[in-house]
Image (cartoon, rainbow, N blue to C red):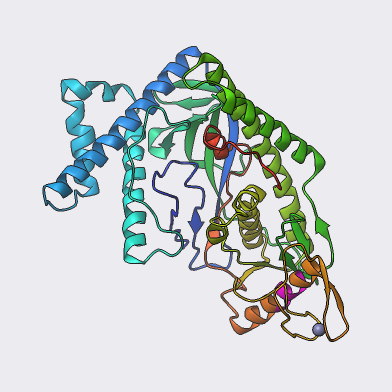
Amino acid sequence: MTKTKWTCIAKTQCLPVRMSWISAIDQHDTVATVQLRYNYRVYPDAAQRTALAQAFGCARVVFNDGLRLRHRAREAGEKYVSDAELSKRVITQAKATPERAWLGEVSSVVLQQALTDLNTAYRNFFASVTGKRKGRKVAPPRFRSRKDNRQAIRFTKNARFKVLDNGRLRLPKVGDLDVRWSRSLPSDPSSVAIIKDAAGRYFASFVVQTAEDETLPPVESEVGIDLGLTHFAVLSDGTKITAPKFLRRAARTLKRLQQALSRKRRGSQNRKKAVVKVARAHARVADTRRDWQHKLSTAIVRENQAIYVEDLCVTGLGRTRLAKSVHDAGWASFTGMLEYKAARYGRTFGRVDRFFPSTRMCSQCGRINDKMALNVRSWDCPCGTTHDRDVNAAINVLAVGQAESLNDRGAHVRPGLVPAARREAVTHPDAACSTRSVEGISVL
Ligand SMILES: [Zn+2]
C-alpha cells in the first residue's frame, strides 16, 4: 500500500504555484513517490479569457468572504469556523443570495479550492505560531486583491478537467484551451492550476505523481558545494561555476528597464506600459535562470553519489547588505532542485550546519584560523597549505557532510521527505514582484 501525505509549506496566500514544495512520504515502500509540477504556456481566446477572469474573480471573492467570516467570528469571540461550515456558508448558502448568485457561473471546484487555499494558509499560520512548523514565521492569511499581479485558480480531478486527443485542455465552464506542450506529461495529472502572471501570460500547471524507480546507477564521487558571492557555486573538486554571460546580459537589460520604470510618473499611461515591459523582462530572466539551474543541478546529481551544501540562513543573510546579491543568486531554488533531484534519483543530499566555520577552517590540518574579510580570496595556513578560500570551504562542507551522514545513517540515506519540483518548467512567480523590485539582478 502506498500512502501519500501532503505537506504544504507555502506562505500565507496558498496559491497553487506558491504551493510548490509538495512533499510526499512513502511510508511502506523503498521507492519514493514524488509529486512534480509541469508547467505549460496556454493561449486562451477572448471568450476564454473572459471566463477565466470571472473564475479568478469568483475564487478571490470566496477566499475573501471566508477570511472575513473567520475574522468576524474571532472578533465576536466565537470559536474558529470549521472548514465544512465555512464552505457551506460562503459557497452553498451564498449562491442562493442575490448578491452572490453569480458564483454559480463558475466551476464549484474552483471555489472549493480557493477555500482549501485559505484553510491551508490558516493551518500553516497556526502551526507556525505554536512552533510545530519550523523555519520562517508564517503570517496570517491576507485578503486577496483585484490588483494582485498574479491570479490563479485550481481544478482537481473532481472538476473533470481533461486533456483532449487534439491536445486541448478542457476546463469546465471555460472551454478547450490551446496548450503549448513543450514536453509530454509522464502520467495522468491529479490537478491543474491556471495562472495569469504580471506580464499577462497564461500557464497551466499540472501536478503529476511519479512512482517509478528512477534510481541512477551508483557512482564513486561525492561533492561538497560552497555557494559564494564571487562565483555562483564552488565544488570541492575545484570547479568554479559562474552564471553564464547571456544570463548576466539579460539581468542588465532588466535593470535598465527597471530604472526607466522608476522615472515614470505614478498613474501615467507610460508607467503602465513600463510595468508590463519590466514584468516580461523579469519573467525572461527567471525562466533562463531556472533552465540553467536545472541543467547544472541535474549534472551534479548525475555525477555524484552524495551532495552536501552549506545550510545557508538565507533569511538571516537577507537582512544584511548582502541581501540583494543573496536573493538574486537564487541559491534557495538551486539547493531545492539538488534536494528533490537527489531524492528522485536515489542520491544522498545533506545540508551542513550553517554555524560551522567552513571558510576559515583548514581542510588539511583542521586548524581554525582567524576570521577573514570578504575580499580575501586565498590564504595560507600555519601548517604550510595555501588555500583558495571557496574551494577550501567546499572541501570542508564535503567532510562535515560525510561525517554527519555516517553518524545519522538513515536520515540522509533515504530521506523521508521528498520535496517536489519547484516550478518544473516555465512559470515564474518572480514576475509577480516586478513592480516592487527596482534594483536589478546582479550576481545570479
Ligand atoms: Zn592547516
Image location of residue 231, percent across then percent down: 77, 55
Nearer to us in this view, 362 or 32: 362
Residue sitting nearer the eye, 100 or 166: 100
Q: Taking the image as four quarters, which one is ligand 1 found in?
A: bottom right
| Residue in the image at 52% along x and 64% along y | 417
Left of 344 or right of it: where is 250?
Answer: right
Image position of 56 with respect to 23: above or below: above
**Residue 387 image offset from top left, x and y in percent:** 84, 73
Q: Is residue 189 above or below residue 318?
A: above
Q: Where is 178 relative to 209, above or below?
A: above
**Residue at 84% over, 66% down:** 238
Which segment did they paint magenta? 394-399
Q: Is residue 125 left or right of residue 49?
A: left
What residue is at 80 percent from the left and 44 percent from the top?
244
Q: Residue at x 48, y 67 (%)?
A: 27
Residue 429 included in the magenta stretch of the image: no
Q: Is residue 377 visible?
A: yes
Q: Is residue 182 visible?
A: no
Which quadrant of the figure has residue 58? top left
